[in-house]
Amino acid sequence: MLLMNDGVKRVAFGYTRVSTEEQTFGASLENQRIAIQKYANQNNIEIIGWYTDAGISAKTAHRPELQKMLADIAKRKGRIDHVVVYNVSRISRDMTSFFNDIGFILAKCGVTLRSTQEVIDESPTGRFMLNIALSVHQLDNDIKSKTVKDDMALLASYGWWMSQAPLGLKLKPIVTGELTNDGKKKHHNTLEIDETNDAGKKIQFLLNRFSEGDIAPMELVNLAHKMGVNGKNGKPITLNTMLGILRQSVYAGYNTSKKLLDGKPTKIKDFDGLIDIDTYNKNQRILSGNHCPLVPSNSELYPLRKLLICEDCGTLIRSSAPRSGSGKASPRYHCTTKGHGSIPIEEMHQLFVDFLEEITPSEGVIKLFKEIVKRTAAKKLGDTTRELAKCREAISDIDKKLIEAVDAMLEGGIGIDEKNRYSEALETKRQDLRREIDKLEQNQGLNEATIDYVCNFMTKPAKLWKDADLETKQAFQKMLFPKGLRFDIKNKIFGTDDLSPLFSVIDNKKESCDGSNSEMVSREGLEPSTLCLRGRCSNQLSYRPTC
């Protein structure tokens, strides 16, 4: 396309691109180069360098030759006039990516884009035409993208696997009778077991093990770690990864993706899965709570989970909800060691409430505690505020360094690869600082109302424990019993070697163990000899309610 020029010879780079090797018609690399050279000859432009990306999409600017061209433009700032392309779609099919990653550098270096098919220059009309061209190409790309997604959904509905292979499986290509534009035979993927390091067999074992219904997901994760099961990143799998594995129907040979054309479960071609459909359905029932798996530790039903320790074996008392023959759940606490017993949650919680009623600090201790906590909280809040300011200042410095890195690249001080490595390192630091800020902001949550509530909790622990939410209950329990609370399930006796000092100091008006020195609590229905609070008379606390 011939444009007006002032007779001055301009210097330019030529850029060509195709998305795949199959694009051989109309926009082939050869055709693009011929058209660009013809355009340059007609407009008194000398092409002094060619850059070509073959088989790469224009959705982003992360293309080797494009990045090399931008780096060369930065090195020769002021000496390159234009970048000439066959049409705008060759350099970008996304407006945001173009203006942020390409147009910004071109403008900084005084380089303008030229197209053999669109009238683009630095005039208002030329810039408007560039926006129109980018919009048209992005629309075309979006339509093609939707068409591809629809085609993939259709193929998935036929039983082909259209995603990456899940953990423990690998893709198995099957050649079809169709041909590509260049005459090659097309193929579609199904799945098969990954035998590398017995990856498939290990996942199969874990899925079957969970279906037995007596192991929690987190315990299954620990088992996977012992077996050497790692995620796609090569690191030990996390709880979220394990839950994803348990929920994926692909391991039973079915695709239940929401992207399927009709939304119905589809049997995957020539793949029977690692487990049968009955085992998969059983695992889903366990995960949804329609079975009797161990209940997650954050369940509102079991606030004493992770606090109670079995007196007989020293292991944490767990929680579960076994079902009777009628199907009704019976939530309870139990020891996993056979024969040590279990106790319904209602009875356990009532025993704990009765216990709390016996360990109330004096009014003087509460006042002292409240003042100490307020002062500590004020100091901590000040420290937190200062740390937040430092982190936010550090993020601001990182932003400045990122801008300086771009300027240094454009001035020729550093190469684009060096700039990218430097920017990635800074972005990693920014993410670390952002996580630290989130953590510090959470620490600002302690206020006077919270302190008052905690103090009220200490003066009326039993009542407020019953009314509190799970998080507050567990925070109080941890403060009161730092090393846990021993419990003899059979005899229903509490005991601890480490009661919080705040609750070890009991009102002196209450009678002592020997009637003189030590401090203890006694009430009707409580055997005095079984409740000895940590102090001058003993280093332990035990409590057995009496009938």
Image: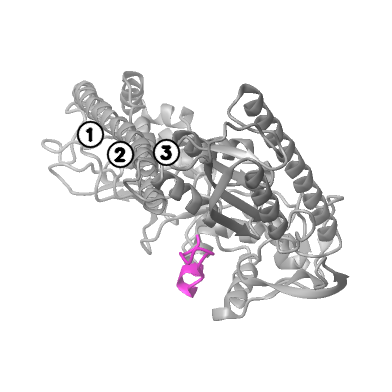
Mark 2: amino acid: Met
Q: Which portion, as a residue range, is magenta?
A: 223-237
Q: Secondary structure at mark 2?
A: helix
Kindly report the distance in space between the C-alpha atoms of the residues bearing marks 2 and 3: 68 Å
Residue to which mark 3 is pinned:
78
Q: Earlier in the sequence, mark 1 or mark 2?
A: 2
Foreground residue, 411 or 324? 411
- The image shows residue 535 at horizontal and vertical percentages of 16, 41
- Mark-to-mark CA distance, 1 and 2: 9 Å
Number of other residues with Cα within 10 Å of mark 3, as a class: few under 14, some 14 to 19, many 20 or more: few
Q: What residue would you read off at disc 1? A: 502
How far, Cα to Cα, is label 1 from label 3? Answer: 74 Å
| Position of residue 282 in the picture relative to residue 470 (left or right) | right
Q: Which mark is residue 341?
A: none
The crowd level at tag 2 (other Cα within 10 Å; few <14, some 14-19, many 20+) is some
What's the amino acid at mark 3? Gly
Question: In the rendered view, would you say 55 is above or below 448?
Answer: below
